[in-house]
Amino acid sequence: MKKFIVAPLLAAVAMFVWGFIYGGAPHLVPYRTLSNISDLNATALAVEKLFPAAGTELPPSPLLGEEKMSALAKRGPSGEVHLTKESLGSGEMGKVMSGGFVYVFVIA
């Protein structure tokens, strides 16, 4: 019975630590970020105008039909946008982190 708790717990700790390092240290991962505040504000306003509702958007949209989506995807650019409208305050981060740990524990 111990191995069904201890092993997943150790695996969850390892996955959580790796995720924390990977997501929390942007200079170690190949992400590009906007550091100029005016660029960041302009981008936030443009994204809010393009995607008025929270959720996941896939430009070009699969709802356009296979032929049109393929043509637009070949032309580029394409992407995946995850948008949350509400603010994530500092008090919410603890809930997000603990939820993430529970998630990786269940996976393990």
Image: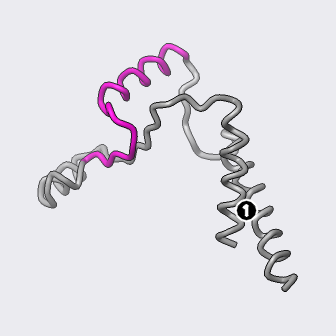
Residue 72 shown left or right of residue 8 in the figure = left
- What SS does tag 1 mark? helix
On the image, the x and y values in percent for residue 40 come to 49, 21
* Magenta-span inclusion, residue 40: yes
In the rendered image, residue 58 lying in the magenta stretch gets the answer: yes
In this rendering, would 67 be left or right of 104? left
What residue sits 73% from the left and 62% below the top? 15
Quarter of image, res 12: bottom right
Q: Residue at x 70, y 60 (%)?
A: 102
Q: How many labels does the image show?
A: 1
Quarter of the C terminus within the rendering = bottom right
Circle 1: residue type: Met
90 and 73: which one is in front?
A: 90
Which stretch is magenta?
Answer: 37-60
103, 79: nearer the viewer: 103
Give the farthest residue toward the bottom: 1
Left-right relation of 98 to 69:
right
Image quadrant where residue 70 sits: bottom left
Relative height, residue 2 to residue 15 (above, below): below
Q: Which residue lies furthest to the top in this view?
A: 38
Label 1 Cα crowd, 10 Å radius (few <14 / some 14-19 / many 20+):
some
Q: Position of residue 47 (x, y in %)?
A: 37, 29
30 lies above or below 53: below
Residue 29: image location, x then y, percent: 64, 46
Residue bearing the label numbered 1:
15
